[in-house]
């Protein structure tokens, strides 16, 4: 399990439930490494701020076999850097990014794809 | 001055130096604000395991930084993260920090501890292929390059150690380095030099990253002849050191030729009431322990400055 303050998705079933029951979901699939931790940090801050209460901020451990639900997405084909960050709207992938992102990049996607 | 946005002390940066300063200042009952552009913890959170922090046998950088954050908050320190500083005014009795979202904060003293970041090459294609062939972390992304041919850029300890580590995945590693000799320790040079999967291109650097969806080749420029040679590769790992995050105080506080803040032994800068600590200052050793020490000294000196200012 990743030791972040985000909601942890442990299984493919949890993942399916999360994106089925919530309109806007951001899942960061990574490890506790230098490219991933800053992205978790940004998501934690945005979650804590309450400004994106319409978004569920989650993580999923990259090396967990159950993460194949993310690793096998067509949208991550060609990705060669973790974390894989996936944005789901009504259960469908609307955006996916590879490797570290800064706050402005994350906010731009949230504001574009998940307008409150 | 008594407003919600006025503090006794503002600390810029929430790495170990800034958080230590925050702990000491707020515990001294000074109204303290930490403003942080990135994730709390700075470079520390990027360390998988810290085994040499006295008093703690083994801990991840992320966990250690979170403990420091909670400690600072427990004494009343306010921490605001993931923001962008637009302007900073260091001269005068009242220091001012303006954020790009329009928020303004003032204080009587300021401690600069913005840390540093990985240096990038800054050549065409670097942004486009980040995460699609360009990486700055072998531990994170090495396994994406299993049985592939890759390039490592750099000639310091990180570059050579990571080049060796990447041979666990890659079929071939080519180290590209700008000088004719390495800056790494001798043992790291020897290990890389004798590794059958590693070869070297010296006095050269990358001029451009090329490819369609993912990296397919790089243009390598020979720095002596300026000759450019296309070089096929599946990925590039860049380890060319760190730069201090001091651009926002350029021309406002004394910096050395590398952009590091020049401080006296009490961490004071050349500007009255302004202190600096951590990886951003001119010093030889950069460890969590030295950052904590710098932050502590800066906080104690800043507290003394405030005391003198208010009693004289």
Image (tube, coloured by chain):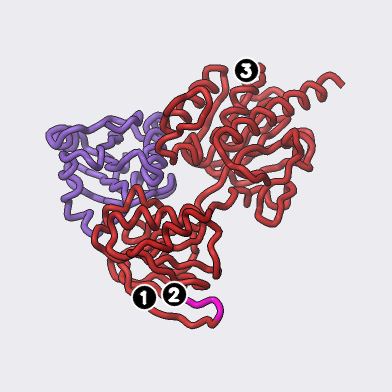
Mark seen at residue B88: none
The numbered mark at residue B231 is 1
Which residue occupies the extreme right position in the image? B312
Q: Which residue is mark 3?
A: B27
Q: Earlier in the sequence, mark 1 or mark 3?
A: 3
Q: Gap in Å between the C-alphas at discs 3 and 2?
A: 54 Å
Q: Position of residue B185 (x, y in %)?
A: 53, 54
Look at the image and give the colour of chain B: red
Observer-side mark, 3 or 2, equals: 2
Which chain is painted in purple? A
**Neighbour class for label 3 at 10 Å: few (<14), some, many (≥20)?**
some
**Mark 2 Cα shell of 10 Å, populated few (<14), some (14-19), many (≥20):** many
Residue B231 magenta-highlighted:
no
Numbered range of the magenta stretch = B220-224
Q: Is residue A95 left or right of residue B179?
A: left
Residue bearing the label numbered 2? B220
Marked residue nearer the N-terminal end (3 or 2): 3
SS for callout 3: helix
Residues at circles 1 and 2 in contact by the CB criterion of under 8 Å: yes
State whether residue B129 appears in this view: no
Q: Residue drawn 59% across and 23% down? A: B23
Q: Is residue B75 above or below residue A55?
A: above
Report x, y in % for residue B235.
Answer: 33, 63
| Quarter of the picture holding the N terminus of chain A | top left
**Residue depth check, mark 1 versus mark 3: number of the one nearer the observer:** 1
Q: Same subunit under labels 1 and 2?
A: yes
How far is mark 1 from mark 3, CA to CA? 57 Å
Q: CA distance from mark 1 to mark 2?
A: 7 Å
Q: Main secondary structure of the magenta part?
A: strand
Which quadrant would residue A8 be assigned to in this image?
A: top left
């Amino acid at each position: 399990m990743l030791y972040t303050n985000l909601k942890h998705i442990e299984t493919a079933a949890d993942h399916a439930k999360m994106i089925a029951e919530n309109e806007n979901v951001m899942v960061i699939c990574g490890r506790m490494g230098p490219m991933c931790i800053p992205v978790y940090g940004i998501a934690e801050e945005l979650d804590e701020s309450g400004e994106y209460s319409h978004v569920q901020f989650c993580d999923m451990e990259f090396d967990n076999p159950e993460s194949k639900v993310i690793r096998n997405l067509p949208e991550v084909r060609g990705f060669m850097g973790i974390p894989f960050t996936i944005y789901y709207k009504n259960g469908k992938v609307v955006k996916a990014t590879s490797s570290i992102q800064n706050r402005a990049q994350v906010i731009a996607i949230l504001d574009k794809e998940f307008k409150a | 001055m008594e407003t919600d946005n006025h503090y006794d002390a503002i600390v810029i940066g929430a790495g170990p130096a800034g958080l230590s300063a925050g702990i000491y200042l707020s515990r001294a009952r000074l109204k303290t604000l930490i403003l942080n552009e990135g994730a709390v913890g700075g470079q520390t959170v990027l360390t998988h395991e810290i085994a040499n922090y006295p008093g703690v046998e083994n801990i991840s950088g992320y966990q250690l930084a979170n403990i420091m954050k909670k400690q600072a908050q427990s004494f009343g320190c306010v921490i605001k993260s993931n923001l962008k500083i637009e302007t900073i005014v260091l001269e005068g009795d009242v220091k001012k920090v303006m954020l790009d979202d329009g928020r303004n904060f003032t204080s009587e003293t300021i401690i600069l501890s913005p840390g540093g970041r990985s240096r990038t090459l800054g050549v065409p294609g670097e942004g486009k292929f980040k995460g699609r062939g360009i990486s700055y972390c072998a531990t994170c992304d090495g396994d994406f390059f299993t049985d592939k041919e890759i390039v490592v850029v750099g000639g310091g300890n990180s570059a050579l150690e990571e080049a060796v580590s990447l041979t666990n995945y890659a079929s071939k590693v080519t180290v590209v380095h700008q000088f004719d000799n390495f800056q790494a320790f001798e043992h790291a040079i020897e290990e890389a030099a004798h590794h059958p999967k590693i070869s070297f291109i010296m006095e050269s650097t990358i001029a451009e990253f090329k490819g369609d969806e993912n990296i397919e080749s790089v243009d390598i420029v020979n720095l002596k002849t300026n000759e450019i040679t296309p070089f096929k590769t599946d990925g590039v790992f860049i380890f060319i050191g760190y730069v201090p995050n001091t651009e926002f105080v350029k021309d406002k506080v004394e910096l050395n030729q590398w952009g590091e803040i020049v401080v006296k032994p009490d961490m004071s800068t050349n500007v009255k009431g302004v202190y600096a600590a951590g990886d951003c200052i001119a010093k030889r050793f950069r460890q969590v322990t030295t950052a904590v020490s710098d932050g502590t000294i800066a906080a104690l000196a800043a507290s003394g400055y405030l005391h003198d200012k208010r009693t004289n």
